[in-house]
Amino acid sequence: MKISKEHFKKEYRRSLTSLYASEIHDLTPLEQYITLGSVVKDYTAQNWMQTKKEYQQDQAKQVYYFSIEFLPGKLLKSNLLNLGILDKVREGLAELGVDFAKLEAIEADPGLGNGGLGRLAACFMDSMATCDVPGNGNGIRYRYGLFKQKFVNGYQVELPDDWLRHENVWETRRENKAEIVRFFGDVHLEEDANGQIKPVYSHTEDILAVPYDTAMTGYENDTVNNLRLWSAEIPPSEEMDYFSEERRKSIHSISEMLYPDDSNYDGRLLRLKQEYFFVSAGVQSIIRYYRKLGVPMEHLAEKISIHINDTHPTMCIPELMRILLDEEGLSWDAAWTITMKTCSYTNHTIMAEALEKWPEQMVSNLVPRIYQIICEINRRHLDSMSPLYGVNFTQRTAIIQDGIIHMAHLAIIGSHSVNGVAKLHTDILKEKALHDFYLAYPARFNNKTNGITHRRWLLLSNEGLSDLISDYIGTEWKKKPNELYLLKAFKEDSVLLEKLEQVKFENKQRLAAYVEETMGIEIDPNAVFDVQIKRLHAYKRQLLNVLHILSMYLKLKESQSGEEIVPRVFIFGAKAAPSYSYAKEIIKLINAAADMINNDTTIDNKIKIVFVENYGVTLAEKIIPAADISEQISLVTKEASGTSNMKLMLNGAITLATLDGANVEIRDKVGDENMLLFGMQDAELYHFYDSNSYHSHEIYDHNPRLKRCIDALVDGTIPNIEAEGREIFDSLLKYNDEYFVLKDYDSYVQAQSRIDGLYRDRKKWNQMSLLNIANAGDFSSDYTIMNYADEIWNVHHNKNL
Ligand SMILES: *Cc1c(COP(=O)(O)O)cnc(C)c1O
């Protein structure tokens, strides 16, 4: 897009006059931000219309990515980057006396996701637009995003995230594209005049689903795709008559709040309502679009691909069946063939508590017609499988078992593709978690290792490193990120290595200033910045990290002379689900340890703990460029992929990791010697499970140093923890340490102890850092998306990337 600086300045002035009828300097920063946003939105609007027109003219096959979460981060800077006008706009604003950084800070970070799942969906939107994949996001416009986290006396407190308080400049409300979603009531089947069986509904509760569209801009390619988020409103027919306050609340509650939990199944009716709400609205709008193409319904799968991101949108399958059967009058077999060809499913977890299961009676009550269709899918599945595989095997794959509907089973049976999100994870799906399904449908199973957009996670968040890279290998890597590989040639270039160290140092200084300003903690940018940022969950083992910190601290206290260690800053960022009390106890423990250690003047600032409040995309963008160590220490097999591992690697951090999730593939790229690996591997863990032979107490009894740290939880060593210390202590010993923290402890401490020596050898360290960056390009979500496009969706993408 050709926009000159002068043109921008003119547009900015014109826009602020028309919005506020004021001079620049009379505007508040918020007003200046909104003005800028509206100018940028104008710039994208042309491409947005054009892209839509081209897709329609070409009748290009479209992908609809259904996800109950999207975590896009702020859009101002990324839109400017993608339009190719970031520098011009920054300069133009400066000439007008406006500080871009200040405006950037005002934008709300849409927290419409919990963590990795929602962030993946956002990276995919970015990559689809950049790779010219005709892609659409479909989700919920939550009035309140994930809670805002505060610490009070070390405890997590949750506050509402009122992200829409100020105008959201990026969204466009499209009332004319609204859909009606039906809940409850009775349904029975009747034959109509043509002998067609049709459902007749009575006493339903109808909701109006209104879409809000947000432009997803591609990187310097003029493609703009659409993210459509649905909001629940009162249907027009009801505005006058039987409107009650109670009914209004019940309707609005559907898109009111994001569920603050991504790893525990929550059986609340409202969650099921949310799922059907965005699925039904989305699928109806797809069919409405498709009908306008004038292509027979039988060809749907040639024009449309519906992707089910985790099980939450699984009702896409029965909803599409419903429309094909009830509205299009197709036979069951015809509808089923179309549905299977159209739908594909990504599995994100093997953790039992996260697998969605709904009571049959709840589904039949809330969405009776969908329930009938699920029953029929199940019945036909059993009928066709039993003769081939026998009754027992077939029963294990049933969708409905003992009154419970298994959403993952429905997703697999109704899709032509089932993918895991890293090699190890996909292998586990095939061999263990979904083994029966793999035997029945081997061709459906495939791997698509997650990725991250290097635009947000390097170009935007680490401009210093981006510029340094371009100085050495040119700028092609920005469009073809695997060209980062060219950096390998400079492995012995001491000038580059020193510059790399310098960029990292400046990023650490920036983060240190931010930490000092916001938390009042002074940290030294010469220390090793050791980072663990992710949701708080037992399987991610933040506890292992803290136990090691305690042991480091106690050792430092004991060796009077003050052992020479490289100063270390441990940085944590993590929210715990409000109902997950164990996770909240770990937060309290980390904060209590931070209080004790940060205020202990006898250790000469050798260790600091920084636990940032309210971890989210914006904070991740500040922390990641400053990281030296990336903690990826989950219990092996439990982290399906992980993506913060990729972001940190891309920014030159050294990964300290178990061979879990995508860490395995990071190892395959950089080699063991450029990582710090530790811990059990999957075979050993499965052996423990099979033989029931793990006894954490034995380790505790035989390891005095570990014992000392664990005892610190309950013996008063750490001031200010009471019940939570005991609960954590009991989880490790009385309840036999479900996540094998004690088992991996020694090996973790050993890996940790290598860091100082490596870090002191600055050249060696910088080389490792460089090789991590050089090998990170393959984890760009651009490649992930092109693999989805080729191997699952069969849609067009730009072949030149
Ligand atoms: C990348 C990201 C995650 C995922 O982190 P993992 O370590 O892979 O769990 C979670 N939250 C935010 C804000 C992220 O940017």
Image (spheres, grey):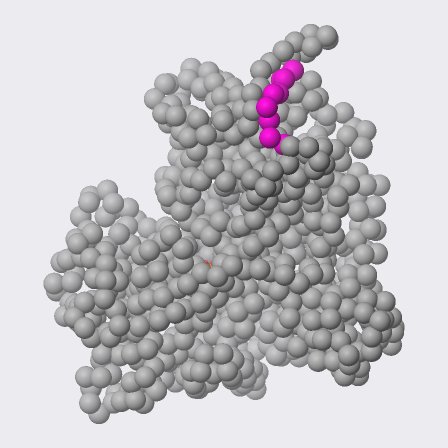
Task: Relative to 208, say whether 194 is above or below.
Answer: above
Task: Relative to 324, say whether 792 is above or below.
Answer: below
Q: Is residue 208 something one can see in this rendering?
A: no
- The boundaries of the magenta stretch are 198-206
Q: Position of residue 550 (x, y in %)?
A: 26, 74
Pick the residue in front: 757 or 247. 247
Pick the residue in front: 120 or 165. 165
Please, what is the dominant secondary structure of the magenta stretch? strand
Q: What residue lies at 60% left-to-right and 60% top-to-bottom?
A: 163
Pick the residue in front: 254 or 516. 254
Residue 672 left/right relative to 415: left
Residue 474 left/right relative to 767: right
The quadrant the C terminus occupies is bottom right
Q: What residue lies at 54% left-to-right and 82% top-to-bottom?
A: 510
Does 199 lie within the magenta span? yes
Does 470 lie within the magenta span? no
> Residue 719's quadrant in the figure?
bottom left
Task: Relative to 510, say whether 211 is above or below.
Answer: above
